[in-house]
Structures are given as structure tokens and as C-alpha cells.
Amino acid sequence: MPKRENNSGTAIQTIRRACSILKCFSEENPELGVTTISQKTGIHKSSTSRILSSLQNEGFVEQNAQSSKYRLGLGLVNLAGLVLERLELRDVAQPIIQKLARITQETINISVLKEDESVNIENINSPQPIQHIGLLGRRTPLHCTSTGKVFLAYMTKAERQNLLDETLKPYTQYTITNRKALEEDLEKVRQQGYAVAHQEFKEGLSAVAAPLFDHNGMVIATVSISGPTYRMEKDKIETYLPYLLETSEEISSKLGYSKL
């Protein structure tokens, strides 16, 4: 046991040192040598060199072949891009989904795909006394929710196979658990451009979702309307659909998507 604590402490120290090294770089000092980094961080020169080598292997720093100095690598740019994309999505979506929330008076969610689940990253809850609360960070399964079906519908069959269990878990009596039936439902989603789920994940809850596309035409998120089933029956969803699809198109457009 003490040995494990030792290893854990060493790993934490190494991570802290790596972070200190990365923080040395700035606009004023985009390239730094091992000696300078060692002096700035107080880390021994040999340790600095080893950590830089590991960071270079991961693409987090690059070495200038001519000067032998280091600079931040493209690996960091890729990670930063993911964060900025999420922030941009929320900033772009917020004023647009406010309009949708006013029209529908139901809960509006922006969700992204995280591994094999859909995760809420932005929401506006319904002002009505009986409502569906769209908690931020809430994770839901893919095969029985409107948001999840959108993500699945725009994947390849192979991608779906990798994400879904062989046996689809029944959450309610309305959950689609037959793979063939789910594939047929997803084909319908692709054709019509939106997905509906009536009580498939939770009894008494219904929702409709549409995809959000980025500048590459990839589905990066969904926008959905959800509420009690008695307020979200077929005719009511049909009333909301034009507004949902308009919201989807407006957000996608601001993210650089074009149908042309």
C-alpha cells in the first residue's frame, strides 16, 4: 500500500511539473530552451528534458530542429479547439433557443455525444408548474431518447454497432429493444431530419430533437423540446416542428453550416 501512495505522489508531481513547463510559454516567449525552462520552473535540467521529451511524444510541444528550442505543439491546439467549439456552441445557441422556449413554453436542451451517451450542455427549463427538468450534465442513453436517436441516425451502421449493446435495455414498456425496429426508426429520422421519443426512456415524458451541424456538415449536437406526454402529443409536436427545425437551421448556420 505505501508503494502505491508513493507511485501516486510521483505521478501527481510529474503532472504538476509538466503543467508548469507548458505555462512557461507565452506570446513574449513562444520558444524556450531546456536551460531557460529549468530556471523558470525550478525543475532540475535533466527532469525538464525528460518531461519535454514525453510532451513532445504526445504532440504537446515541438522542438525547433535549428535552435533546439521548444514551442507549444499542435496537440494542444486540437484540445483547445474542442473546448472552444463547445463554448462557441453554447454562446451561439443560447439566444436562439430562448426564442424557441418562449414559443413552446417547454424545456429546451442542447446536447452533445459523449462516448455512448447524450449529455446536456445547455438548457432552458419550462416555466410551467409541471415540467421536465433538463439538468446540465445529465447523461441519457441513445436508443430510447430523441437526442440519442438523432446521433445514431447520422452515424454509419458500424459506428452504431460499436456504441450499442447487443441487447437494447428496456427502460419502459415503450422502449424499442429490437435492433431491426430501431434501424427502421433511425432510417425514418434520417429522412425527416428529426427524431421523436414518446415515453421510451421515461413514462410520461416525450421529446422531439433535431441535429445541429458544424461547418464540415457533421452532427455535433442536438436541440430538443421535451415535456409531459399529455402536452407533447402528436398534434402538438407537429405544431412545434417548424420552430424546432428553424432553430436547428439557424444555429447550424451560425456554426458555419451550409446546405449548398
Image (cartoon, rainbow, N blue to C red):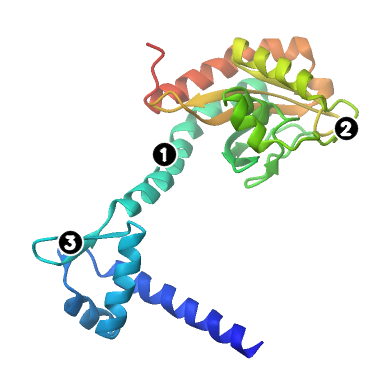
Q: Is residue 248 left or right of residue 103?
A: left
Q: Tell me which numbered mark, 1 or 3, is placed earlier along the sequence.
A: 3
87 shown above or below 24: above
Q: Which residue is mark 2?
A: 172
**Mark 2 residue element:** loop
Pair 1/2: label in front:
2
For the residue carrying disc 2, how many other residues have a C-alpha within 10 Å: few (<14), some (14-19), or many (20+)?
A: few
How many badges with numbers are in the image?
Answer: 3
Three-letter amino acid code at the position of disc 3: Pro
The residue at which mark 3 appears reads as 30
Label 1 belongs to which residue? 88
Q: CA distance from mark 1 to mark 2?
A: 36 Å
**What percent of the width, then of the height, locates residue 109?**
62, 34
Of discs 1 and 3, which sits in the foreground?
3
Number of residues whose C-alpha sits closer than 10 Å to that of mark 1, classed few (under 14), some (14–19) or many (20 or more)? few
Residue 248 vs 61, above or below: the answer is: above
Q: Amino acid at mark 1?
A: Glu
